Image: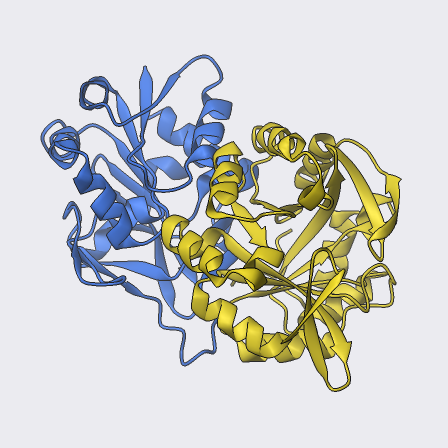
Amino acid sequence: MLKNRIIPCLDVKNGRVVKGINFVGLKDAGDPVEQAKIYSDGGADEICFLDITASNENRDTIYDVVEQTSKKCFVPLTVGGGVRSVEDISKLLSCGADKVSINTAAVENSKVVIDSSKKFGSQCIVVAIDAKKNGDKWEVFTHGGRNNSGIDTLEYAKQMEENGAGELLVTSMDRDGTQVGYDIDLMFKISSKVNIPVIASGGVGNLDHLVDGIKLGNASAVLAASIFHYGKYSIKEAKEYLDSKGIPVRI
Amino acid sequence: MNVTIVDYNSGNISSVINSFKEVAKNKVKIEVTSDLNKIKSSDKLVLPGQGSFKSCMDALNKINGLTDRLNEFVINNKKPLLGICVGLQMFADIGYEEIETKGLGWISGKVSKIDNQEGKFKLPHIGWNQINIVKDSKIFQNIENNSHMYFVHSYEFVPNEKNVISATTDYSSNIVCSVEKENIFGTQFHPEKSDKIGLQVIKNFINL
């Protein structure tokens, strides 16, 4: 039986791990290579790096981080943040990333997803969607949540599936950093709309939120950052809790 | 001894290289090349594969003499080869991803899309799933039945000879996830991404 995945996400800036609260107010939480290794040894099903300021700063540090991490961690490694082109994707993959997540570029230029999924295969193309509720719909935001594209999230999700995305990483902008739980309604609607796996992100504050993301949101995988970073819960505790709630996990 | 990872421009093979180097330490030489002479003199080959069946077969065929050299290595000289993911799928006679494409034909059978039962099952089949070991395979030494391995694929290999199947996994149906036929080994899952248990599979292959 296929297991639901738990994916710790490390926000990386200038080669160091930081955690943003609603994308501002950054704290240093250590070396990404070491952190990733701790997570993979602890049973993380995948590791995710998000290079949060990549759009406007020197990108080379992330390549080095990816290269070092991929020599020590033998679980899938997803890298995103500031990925603009097929060349960026190619470079991250050749440094040892297994999947690349594309956010702003996927909105601005649909060819990036179409071309990269053809070139490298859908299995390594994750489209990251930052969605914010507006009335009875959700709109897609770009540039780390700064710009509203006005695009409807559900339509966009379907379009990205058709363009060749292998997975969707869906972050609720309303919930990110709040620790009050995923936007379950959003996760469920997207997951019902597409036939590719959905990774839920944004808002986890306790282990019940992970359970809800899978059971109620129908997510294939749950991504979380701060609950793992500051030692509130270990990956093992999270998995044992999910297991106790009848969710299939790899233990 | 040296093990060659066949580099035929089929997408991302960094993780395969990293994992084999991790297991080999400095005792076994790991080469990464499409050089025909180096392939010939290797003790073992690894055939990775990402993307589609067609794109991988096209990439193999694009390198002049490569498929002939692989045939000679595997069929005539009976030296060990491990195919991973699409690398395993290419053992088949034929694949149906994108368009009908001829495979290497080492193990008779076809590669077709996983039946998602009208959307009930998400595709690709991504994540950790358990393997049911159905026959003793040399690459499963010290691997317990029901171990978790990492998968990412939408197509499955359906071999004609069922006795080549060494493990299956349950998704929408019973999917073949490992084969062994004499000197030919293949895994649909990614041992290079399957943590310590995956590295054990790689170690078993290197130690054959």
Query: Is residue A220 left or right of B151 when viewed as pictured?
Result: right
Residue B134 visible in the shown view: no
Q: Quadrant of residue A214?
A: bottom right
Residue B160, horizontal then vertical, whole percent: 17, 59
- At 42% from the left and 70% from the top, the residue drawn is B172
Query: Residue, x 17% and y 50% (percent of image)?
Result: B103
Chain identifier for the yellow-coloured part of the image: A
Color style of the picture: by chain
Q: Quadrant of residue A17?
A: top right
Q: For this rendering, which residue is in front, B7 or B198?
A: B7
Residue B193 located left or right of residue B32: right
Q: Which percent across, then down, holds residue B55?
A: 27, 50
Q: Is residue B13 above or below residue A206?
A: above
Of residues A149 and A60, which is closer to you in this image? A149
Above or below, A185 against A148 in this view is below
Say whether residue A115 is visible.
yes
Residue at the spot x=57%, y=42% of the render? Answer: A75
Q: Residue A113 location, x and y as percent?
A: 47, 58
Q: Quadrant of residue B46?
A: top left
Give the residue displayed 67% in from the left and 30% down from the top.
A61
> For this rendering, which residue is in front, B139 or A60?
A60
Q: Is residue B34 above or below residue A200?
A: above
Query: How many numbered circles does the render carry?
Result: 0
| Chain letter, blue in picture | B
Question: Where's residue A247, x and y in %?
Answer: 66, 66
Residue lying at the far bottom in this picture: please name it. Answer: A136
